[in-house]
Image (cartoon, rainbow, N blue to C red):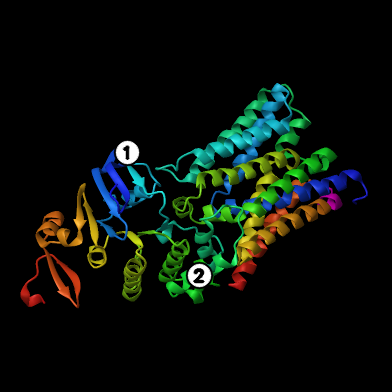
């Protein structure tokens, strides 16, 4: 592993018994990087993420993680158990408690860390509310606060903007960018939204039907590469400093 | 009514069984595996039935089979083509049929057999009641100490695992405590009441409780109240206490359901 690498994957073969989603996959994730894993539904990006996290075993190959780094995971909201009547505060506290021994009681420091985490995602007012009564965007902020309460070196997010309106989506993206710049937190996110990754990530992994492109975003996001990968013309433009993708054939008069 | 020693012992056994079962059942209902309680209760009866044949202490055999079942089901990977509850249904069907087959093959098919299947809290001995109290205290202490861990793995096991929590171990510990409690109670109060106490008080509590701590307290109180009232009603009207208690619990769930809707 290189000096700044915190995770290394070697010759990974991903999938299930009779279905290989990706193979011969080797890469490193460096400290302070924002890596976006993007691809259509079912291409194996969540499987890759879960393999990186150690939640599933690869068919072959292996993942090595720097044992000194703290990793926090923000899963898809659908994976959470909503029958449990717990408040946003209690959920964020879980992120803190998971770091310590099971018999350790919650102290003032923990409660302060939890309040700070809630404040950072602008969710202080949600603290006493039942998690299951919150909107999708509010729930996402609470889960993010739970991850932050663990004071992680690496933040891993699975479809963090799914089901959000554009204002909430923009707020989450700004927050992740600031977190990475101000505190050097490594961010690893999976999404099916290419436009999200190309405006946030420093490196990306583009997955589609067994094909994987991995490298700096500027190298991957080229019209010829994307057009070849998706099989339709892909045009790249800039609006207000943000990259914009236009997919398909469009006449000039249509614009 | 409680002048007679057997009634006092029955009350003690009922209380000792109801509180831990009602508290542990909250996890089963939240994890959507309520029938795991039924499986563990029936696995315990399989063990007790085997014990009748090989002349072992039924309590020991019941604990062994219930714990083995809890571990076995906990160790299974999530099924890919059927729902997890289908596997639990399979285990229940297997355990229930095994119990009947083993007892049918056994030489002794008498009142002991009926006691094994349906339990009878009025026939509990003083020593067994004290044993129930001891198990109840140990299990309750474990949950006071480690309840936050059990909730952590119940809410989001994967995030907990990523954070370094040994989720499989904690899940197995939870199943183990449920298995042991179900095994020691099933022989005294029967599979039906054991399953009902694991399921109905938590349901009632979740219908009206707004906080998880409140849910645990309401569940324990509902279980406790039902077994006490069930025992009194059974004595007054000369009815079997187990089914009376289950009927009271079912009624309580209905009332709580209405109360929960009214509050909402």
Q: Are marks 1 and 2 on the same chain?
A: yes
Out of A18 and B222, give the one closest to the viewer.
A18
Compared with A215, A116 (above or below) is: below
Which residue position holds label 1?
A59
Question: Left or right: B143 with respect to B245?
Answer: left
Residue A111 drawn at (x, y percent): 56, 68
From this viewpoint, is residue A181 visible? yes
Task: Classify mark 2: helix, strand or loop.
Answer: helix
Task: Classify mark 1: helix, strand or loop.
Answer: loop
Residue sitting at x 93%, y 49% = B3
Out of B162 and A33, give the one closest to the viewer.
A33
Question: Left or right: A47 with respect to A134?
Answer: left
Magenta region: B234-239
Say few, some or many: other residues with alpha carbon within 10 Å of mark 2 (under 14 / 14 to 19 / 20 or more). Answer: few
Q: Which corner quadrant holds the C terminus of chain A? A: bottom left
From this viewpoint, is residue A42 visible? no
Which residue position holds label 2?
A133
Residue B110 within the segment the image draws in magenta: no
Say few, some or many: other residues with alpha carbon within 10 Å of mark 1 (under 14 / 14 to 19 / 20 or more). Answer: some
Out of A123 and B108, give the one closest to the viewer.
A123
Chain of the residue that carries numbered disc 1 in the rendered image: A
Residue B207 drawn at (x, y percent): 61, 63
Chain of the residue that carries numbered disc 2 in the rendered image: A
Question: Left or right: A138 with respect to A16?
Answer: right
- By secondary structure, the bulk of the magenta-drawn segment is best described as helix
Q: Choose the circle earlier in sequence order: 1 or 2.
A: 1
Residue sitting at x 76%, y 57% = B225
Instruction: Say the numbered circle drawn on residue A157.
Output: none
Query: Which residue ends up furthest to the left in the rendered image?
Result: A252
Residue sitting at x 68%, y 45% = B194
Question: Left or right: B199 with respect to B82?
Answer: right
């Amino acid at each position: 592993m290189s000096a700044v690498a915190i995770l290394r994957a070697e010759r990974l073969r991903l999938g299930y018994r009779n279905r290989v989603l990706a193979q011969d996959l080797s890469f490193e994730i460096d400290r302070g990087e924002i890596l976006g894993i993007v691809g259509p539904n079912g291409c194996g990006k969540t499987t890759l993420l879960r393999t990186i996290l150690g939640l599933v075993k690869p068919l072959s190959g292996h993942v090595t993680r720097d044992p000194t780094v703290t990793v926090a995971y923000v899963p898809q909201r659908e994976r959470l158990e909503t029958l449990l009547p717990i408040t946003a505060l209690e959920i964020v506290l879980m992120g803190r408690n998971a770091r310590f021994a099971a018999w350790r009681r919650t102290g003032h420091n923990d409660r302060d860390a939890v309040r700070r985490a809630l404040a950072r995602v602008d969710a202080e007012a949600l603290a006493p509310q039942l998690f299951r009564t919150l909107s999708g965007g509010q729930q996402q902020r609470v889960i993010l606060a739970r991850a932050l309460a663990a004071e992680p070196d690496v933040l891993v997010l699975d479809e963090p903007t799914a089901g959000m309106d554009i204002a909430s989506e923009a707020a989450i993206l700004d927050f992740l960018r600031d977190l990475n710049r101000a505190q050097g937190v490594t961010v690893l996110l999976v999404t099916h939204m290419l436009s999200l990754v190309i405006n946030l990530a420093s490196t990306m992994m583009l997955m589609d039907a067994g094909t994987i492109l991995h490298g700096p975003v500027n190298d991957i996001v080229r019209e010829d590469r994307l057009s070849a990968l998706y099989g339709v013309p892909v045009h790249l433009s800039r609006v207000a400093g943000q990259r914009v993708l236009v997919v398909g054939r469009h006449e000039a008069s249509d614009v | 009514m409680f002048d007679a020693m057997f009634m006092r012992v029955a009350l003690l056994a009922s209380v000792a069984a109801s509180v831990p079962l009602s508290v542990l059942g909250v996890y089963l209902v939240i994890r959507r595996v309520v029938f795991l309680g039924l499986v563990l209760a029936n696995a315990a009866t399989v063990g007790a039935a085997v014990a009748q044949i090989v002349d072992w202490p039924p309590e020991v055999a019941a604990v062994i089979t219930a714990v083995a079942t809890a571990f076995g089901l906990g160790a299974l990977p999530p099924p890919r083509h059927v729902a997890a509850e289908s596997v639990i249904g399979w285990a229940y069907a297997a355990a229930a049929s095994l119990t009947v087959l083993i007892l049918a093959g056994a030489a002794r098919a008498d009142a002991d057999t009926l006691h094994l299947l349906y339990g009878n809290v009025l026939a509990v001995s003083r020593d067994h009641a004290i044993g129930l109290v001891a198990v109840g205290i140990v299990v309750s202490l474990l949950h006071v100490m480690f309840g936050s861990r059990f909730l952590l793995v119940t809410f989001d096991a994967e995030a907990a695992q990523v954070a370094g929590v040994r989720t499989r171990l904690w899940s197995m510990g939870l199943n183990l405590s449920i298995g042991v409690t179900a095994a020691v109670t099933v022989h005294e109060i029967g599979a039906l009441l054991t399953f009902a106490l694991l399921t109905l008080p938590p349901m009632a509590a979740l219908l009206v409780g707004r906080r998880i701590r409140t849910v645990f307290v309401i569940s324990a109180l509902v279980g406790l109240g039902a077994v006490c009232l069930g025992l009194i009603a059974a004595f007054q009207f000369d009815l079997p206490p187990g089914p009376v208690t289950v009927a009271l619990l079912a009624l309580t769930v209905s009332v709580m359901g209405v109360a929960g809707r009214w509050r909402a």
